[in-house]
Image (tube, rainbow, N blue to C red):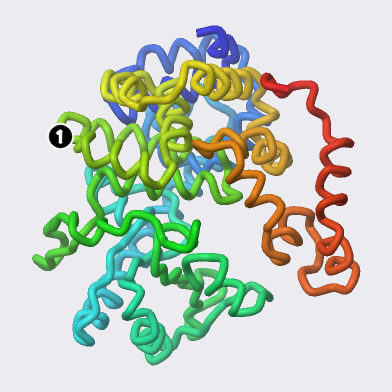
């Protein structure tokens, strides 16, 4: 494919292929020996997309072919991630046992869940915090459990009402832990905030599966289908829409569960919740970088119109041609360019922009959330947002 003319992306592709499928060491060696690599931009991509552990696993035997700076970066991130994951896992087991004592079931989601399930063979994935899901009716009891364990709410300078009305989790920080390695817990009561007056995926608690982990503990996890929904929903909420870390997650999920994936459930729920587009976006992105049969087959199963498919594919392939577009400084631009592609209908993304909460508006435009000037701009957001868009550079947007 033409976007693999970039030596850096071609190397990333082969690193991912090596981690997912094994092999590819000879091709990685050939790239390192014969291709011109812009190590400065590659280092930035590795850090921003949190893929250092994958690089370390794939090329540690070829360290003599890479610059010392990159070698040091990979070693630090790999061993630091392994150490941090160990701390996080031990903390999660303590939380799991304590919640169980109180008669409350918790589910690990995203990072910890993937570490236990998808990364069980090499146990290294970057994790920022412990995400746990709890039934909504038990949220108050769960909050009390965390507070009694020495955690305190971390509202990130925002009002608690914002998190409860417009988000689906509240963060807690262990105030007793060293600031060098704080333990953060995100207590979720849903996988996404309310849309059209209700929460999504009401059946996920009926579809749990059980795995056995350390100390013979049985832990319940989301089904593979609901795990895919959790990734797609996270990309849609002001996240990094071109996350390479999620590319690896998605490929590992389909590599392990693709043959048993419940497409009847997935397509029915995706249609009901309007999740075809964001799911296709994620699967096509993963398949563009890691080519495995399970991903290619999965992309074909989602019944989007040819027009919508082409727009999504064109944007993704264009982004993969310009590596600078995949770095942190372009996060806002990437979100604006992909926002309308994450929704199955045309009016929901417009409705979301026009009814955006004050706090989310402030975050997006780097404003102080409760400042008087911010409130004035927010009051005139119907003019402020279009004005910002007018001065936005749309030259590289394929569907503009």
Residue matched to label 1: 260
From what the image shows, is residue 151 above or below residue 71? below
Residue placed most toward the observer, 205 or 352: 352
291 sits left or right of 2 in the view: left
Q: Is residue 12 left or right of residue 60?
A: right
Which of the 4 image quadrants contains residue 69?
A: top right
Q: Is residue 221 visible?
A: yes
Q: Who's the residue at 73% across and 41% down the image?
A: 329
- Secondary structure of the residue carrying tag 1 is helix
The one of 33 and 163 positioned closer to us in this rendering? 163
In the rendered view, would you say 149 is above or below 118?
A: below
**Residue drawn at 30 percent across, 77 percent down:** 95
The crowding category of the residue bearing disc 1, from other C-alpha atoms within 10 Å (few below 14, some 14 to 19, many at least 20), is: few
Q: Quadrant of the C terminus?
A: top right
Residue 15 in view: no
Q: Position of residue 381 (x, y in %)?
A: 82, 55
Q: Nearer the viewer, residue 201 or 55?
A: 201
Pick the front one: 77 or 72: 77
Q: How many marks?
A: 1
The x and y percentages for residue 160 are 59, 79
* Residue 97: image location, x then y, percent: 22, 78
Above or below: residue 351 compared with residue 32? below
Please provide percent x and percent y for residue 226: 30, 48
Furthest-left residue in this view: 216
Residue at 31% of width from left, 64% of height from top? 89
**Residue drawn 36% across the image and 66% down it:** 132
């Amino acid at each position: 494919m033409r976007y693999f003319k970039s030596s850096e992306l071609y190397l990333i592709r082969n690193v991912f292929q090596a981690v997912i499928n094994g092999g590819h060491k000879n091709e990685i060696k050939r790239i390192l020996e014969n291709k011109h690599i812009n190590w400065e931009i590659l280092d930035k991509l590795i850090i921003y997309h949190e893929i250092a552990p994958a690089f370390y696993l794939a090329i540690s035997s070829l360290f003599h072919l890479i610059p010392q700076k990159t070698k040091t970066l990979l070693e630090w991130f790999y061993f630091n991630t392994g150490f941090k994951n160990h701390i996080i896992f031990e903390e999660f087991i303590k939380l799991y046992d304590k919640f169980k004592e109180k008669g409350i079931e918790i589910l690990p989601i995203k990072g910890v869940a993937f570490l236990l399930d998808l990364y069980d063979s090499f146990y290294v994935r970057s994790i920022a915090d412990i995400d746990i899901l709890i039934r909504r009716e038990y949220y108050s009891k769960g909050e009390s459990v965390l507070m009694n364990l020495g955690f305190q709410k971390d509202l990130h300078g925002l009002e608690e009402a914002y998190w409860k009305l417009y988000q689906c989790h509240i963060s807690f920080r262990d105030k007793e832990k060293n600031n060098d390695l704080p333990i953060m817990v995100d207590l979720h009561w849903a996988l996404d905030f309310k849309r059209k007056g209700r929460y999504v995926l009401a059946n996920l608690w009926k579809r749990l599966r059980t795995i056995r982990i350390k100390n013979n503990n049985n832990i319940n996890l989301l089904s593979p289908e609901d795990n895919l929904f959790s990734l797609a929903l996270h990309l849609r909420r002001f996240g990094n829409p071109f996350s390479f870390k999620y590319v690896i997650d998605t490929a590992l999920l389909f590599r392990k569960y693709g043959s048993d994936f419940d497409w009847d459930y997935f397509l029915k729920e995706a249609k009901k919740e309007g999740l075809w587009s964001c799911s296709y976006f994620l699967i096509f992105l993963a398949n563009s970088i890691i080519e495995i049969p399970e991903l290619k087959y999965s992309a074909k199963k989602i019944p989007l119109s040819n027009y919508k498919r082409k727009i999504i594919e064109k944007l993704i392939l264009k982004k993969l041609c310009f590596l600078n577009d995949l770095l942190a400084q372009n996060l806002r631009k990437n979100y604006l360019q992909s926002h309308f592609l994450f929704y199955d209908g045309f009016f929901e993304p417009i409705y979301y922009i026009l009814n955006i909460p004050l706090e989310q508006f402030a975050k997006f435009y780097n404003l102080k959330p409760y400042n008087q000037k911010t409130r004035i701009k927010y009051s005139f957001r119907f003019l402020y947002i279009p004005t910002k868009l007018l001065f936005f550079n749309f030259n590289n947007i394929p569907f503009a």
